[in-house]
Amino acid sequence: MQPVLYTIIKKQSLHELLETFYQCIDLPIQVLDEHGEVLDSFGKIHEYCSIFKQFLPSTESCAKLHSNAGKLAMSLGETYIFSCHSNLNHIVFPLSNNGVLLGSILAGPFLMDNPDSLLLFDISKKYDIPTVNILEMYDEANKLPIIEPARVTYISRLLYYMCSGLVTDSKSNFVLNHNKLSQQSKINESIQMYKATTHINQKAYPYEKEKALITKLKTGDTEKSKALLNDLLGYVFFAEGNNLEVVKSRAMELSSLLSRAAIEGGATSDSILKINNQFLKDLQDIDTLDNLCYKLQETIDVFTDCMFNYIPSKSNEITKKAIRYISKNFTRNLTLDDVAGHVHLNPAYFSTLFKQSTGSSFKEYLNMVRIEESKRLLANTDYSIIDIALATGFEDQSYFSKVFKKYTGLTPKQYR
């Protein structure tokens, strides 16, 4: 009966891949099925392994170890370098479809340093191998390929590039798992940072990072936006623990924050409303913290696309540049002439172009950005209304209150 793996990937394609790798790297390589059994190979089984296998219990078979290594590599989202029962090194790449391991590509065995007595001492004790056989294994160990750690990393990377396109779904899941793991690593770094600080009650919610997140999102800096999001998530986990429902409520607040920032950044409210509603629907079906965090991270890409990709191509770069400038300078006495000068256009022409691109006049857009920031300050700080008015670029409290009511239907005092 044909192995399941060969119903997804052509046997000849895998055979040629193995041959290419072996001829270039001169390292044994195998195709394994989902149980770790060998389907195809290049390079002979080393005599070191042949001697050792005589003493390996059936409950600790190489096939079982290799299969488990493939599953771990699939969950990690990257090639996996591991040591086998006999302390020899291997590199495994998983071949999966719809989250199911179909098989693996296994390269090895090899050593990363010259063999010594310590390599075999633990093995002889654990598996009760006679001295005569241990001495034979030591002689054979000196014939094993030795690859320095830095080169192992490159070989591992090469294996990824060669194999990642073999199964389309495998590649997408592989990348997804890798991205999730990477995000969780960054969140854990943030958690450790907060743990190293003083008591949680003395470490207030980092509103300055929330504000920075808004600014970075509005200027299209997705990488820094994601970094700040992960930092904020780290704080939430530290302060609230791993309670999924509590974190979901914080995720809803962050999504609302990102939505407002996207609209401030120039996205249409209709598109952002649809995206946010879809996120809230998806939120109900999310049952793990890593999926929840990753879904939030994905919204940054989507909101950024809405801010910058809907603008007509003719004025795309000009409008993006103007929006970034407004986002960075709205707190000062910013004028149409200032922004027009920044993008090197006649003020009248820029005003027309900006209205065509965003659907709002320069003044309307500027006030919208200022009001959204003032809403955040009213909700999250104890600053006086006059201080908030001045901090968001309004010249006096009276005009601020008039504009605020126009956009929200409430006075700043009522909103607070």
Image: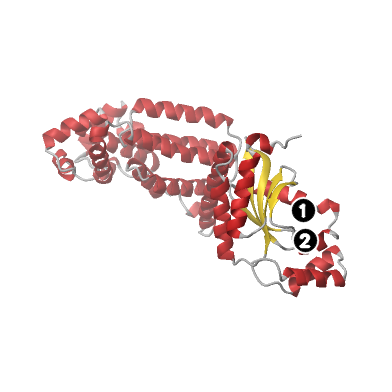
Given the image, on which type of amino acid does mark 1 rest? Answer: Cys
Q: Position of residue 72 (x, y in %)?
A: 66, 48
Counting other residues with Cα less than 10 Å from the Cα at mark 2, is it few (<14), some (14-19), or many (20 or more)?
Answer: some
283 vs 53, left or right, is: left
- The CA distance from mark 2 to mark 1 is 10 Å
Query: Which image quadrant is residue 244 in?
Result: top right
Given the image, on which type of amino acid does mark 2 rest? Answer: Cys
Residue 50 visible to an observer of this rendering: yes
Q: Position of residue 339 (x, y in %)?
A: 18, 42
Secondary structure of the residue carrying tag 2 is: helix
Compared with 192, 287 (above or below) is above
Q: Nearer the viewer, residue 246 or 215?
A: 215
Residue 361 visible to an observer of this rendering: no
Q: Residue at x 81, y 70 (%)?
A: 136
Compared with 317, 66 (above or below) is below
Secondary structure of the residue carrying tag 1 is: helix
330 vs 282, left or right, is: left
Query: Which image quadrant is residue 404 in?
Result: top left
Residue bearing mark 2:
49
Q: Nearer the viewer, residue 300 or 55?
A: 55
Residue bearing mark 1:
62
